[in-house]
Amino acid sequence: MNAPAMITTTGQKIATQRTTKSRLPETDLDQIKFGRVFSDHMFVMDYADGEWQQPRIVPFANLEMSPAALVLHYSQTIFEGLKAYRNVNGGVSLIRPQANIARMNHSTRRMCMPTIPEDAFLDGLIELVKLDQEWIPKDEGASLHIRPFMFATDEYIGVRPSDGYRFIIFTCPVRNYYSEPVRVKIETTYSRAFPGGTGETKCGGNYGGGLYPAKLGQDQGFHQLLWTDGLSHKYIEESGTMNVFFNIDGTLITPALDGTILRGITRDSIIRIAQDEGIRVEERQVSVEEIESAARNGRLRSAFGAGTAATIAHIQSIAFDGAVYDLPDVSTRELANRGKEAR
Ligand SMILES: *Cc1c(COP(=O)(O)O)cnc(C)c1O
C-alpha cells in the first residue's frame, strides 16, 4: 500500500460526554455473542464545509439521518476492524492501529471520501478504548473489537460523491468468532471482486454482494466460501472476511495481493512471524487445481483463514466440484497452531 499523503491532525480537542448510566453492570462478558454487544461510548467526527469538525465522544446511541442520505442508496461507506486486548501486564494493547488507519485512508480514496487525519483517528481510538476499557473481557481469546467506519450523509438522491460524511468508532467485547474448524467451498460461479473493482477496499458493497453466494453455500452445509478470481475462476483469492493460507509440504502459501484481495493486516503479521521463524512463505497465484491435487495427494497439510475477527480459523475440509477434501486433524497442525498462539 502506498503511504497516503495525510493531513496529520485536526488540531482539535475531543469533547467528551460520558454516559450517565453504564450498561456494563447488566452485561455478562462471559456470555456475549460476536458483534451484538456494544460498549458505552462512541467516537464521532463529522466532515462538513470541506473540513473535519470537532471530534467528540458520546454515549453509544442510535443515529438520526435522512431517508435520502446518500449512503443508504449507493453504499458510499467504508469500515475497518481492529482489536484491543488485555496484555499479560494487565494493560491494554492495540494491534497495529496505524496499519488500519492507513488502510482506511486507502479505502477513502477509492470511494471518493475525505482522508481522515491520522492523529485525530489515533487519538480518538485511544481515548475511546481508555474510556471503555472495563468492557475488554479479561480471559484468553477474548478481546475488544473496534469498528471505525465512515459514510456519506448528504440528503440527495443523485449519484455523486457526498459533501458531508460522518466518521464513527464504536467497540464491542467479543469472544472467538469461529470456535470450530470451518468447512469451506471453492466458489466458481459467483464473484466477490474483479480487476479494477473494489476488492481491496473495505467498502460496504463488497459484503452485500457476497451474501447470496455465501447463503447458497451455507444451505449446502459450508460455513464459508473460498472466492476465486472473477475472470477465470481458476485462482483462489480469499474467504468472507479472511485471507487464506495453505501449508503444502511445509511451505506456507497465500495468494498474492493483486488489487482484488483485501490487504489483511493479520495476513501480513502471519507472513512476518512465519519468516522470522524460518518458515518458507510464498505469496503468489494459487490455482484451484494446485490445491485440489495437493489435497488429493496428502500434501496439503493444513489450510486456514486469517483475519482480525476470526484470528486464525482452521479449515477442516475444502469442497470443490462436488468432491469434499478433508484435511488432517487440527491438533496435528503445527504451523497454524503456532500462529494462533503468536496472534
Ligand atoms: C477485513 C478483511 C480481511 C482481513 O483483514 P485483517 O486486517 O486481517 O482483519 C480479509 N478479507 C476481507 C474481505 C476483509 O474484509
Image (cartoon, rainbow, N blue to C red):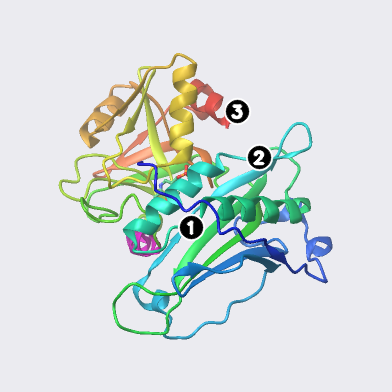
Image-based side of 343 in relation to 199, left or right = right
Marks 3 and 1, Cα distance to the nearest angstrom? 33 Å
Residue pointed to by mark 2? 141
- Highlighted magenta segment, given as a residue range: 204-216
Q: Is residue 320 above or below residue 326?
A: below
Residue 305 sits in quarter: top left
- Helix, strand or loop for disc 1: loop
Q: Is residue 25 magenta?
A: no
Disc 1 crowd, CA 10 A, few/some/many (<14, 14-19, 20+): many
Q: Quadrant of the C terminus?
A: top right
Residue 18 x %, y %: 77, 67
Query: Could you tell me the amino acid type at mark 1?
Result: Ile
- Helix, strand or loop for disc 2: loop
Marks 1 and 2, Cα distance to the nearest angstrom? 31 Å
**Mark 1 in CB contact with mark 2 (< 8 angstroms):** no
Labels 1 and 2: the sequence-earlier one: 1
Query: Could you tell me the amino acid type at mark 2?
Result: Gly
Residue pointed to by mark 3? 341
Image-based side of 308 in relation to 299, left or right = right
Residue 116, numbered label: 1
Residue 312 x %, y %: 51, 37
Image-based side of 60 in relation to 20, left or right = left
Residue 182 x %, y %: 46, 42
Residue 50 sits in quarter: bottom left
Q: Residue at x 65, y 64 (%)?
A: 42
Q: In this view, does 343 lie above or below 166?
A: above
Q: Which residue is drawn at 84% across and 61% down?
A: 25
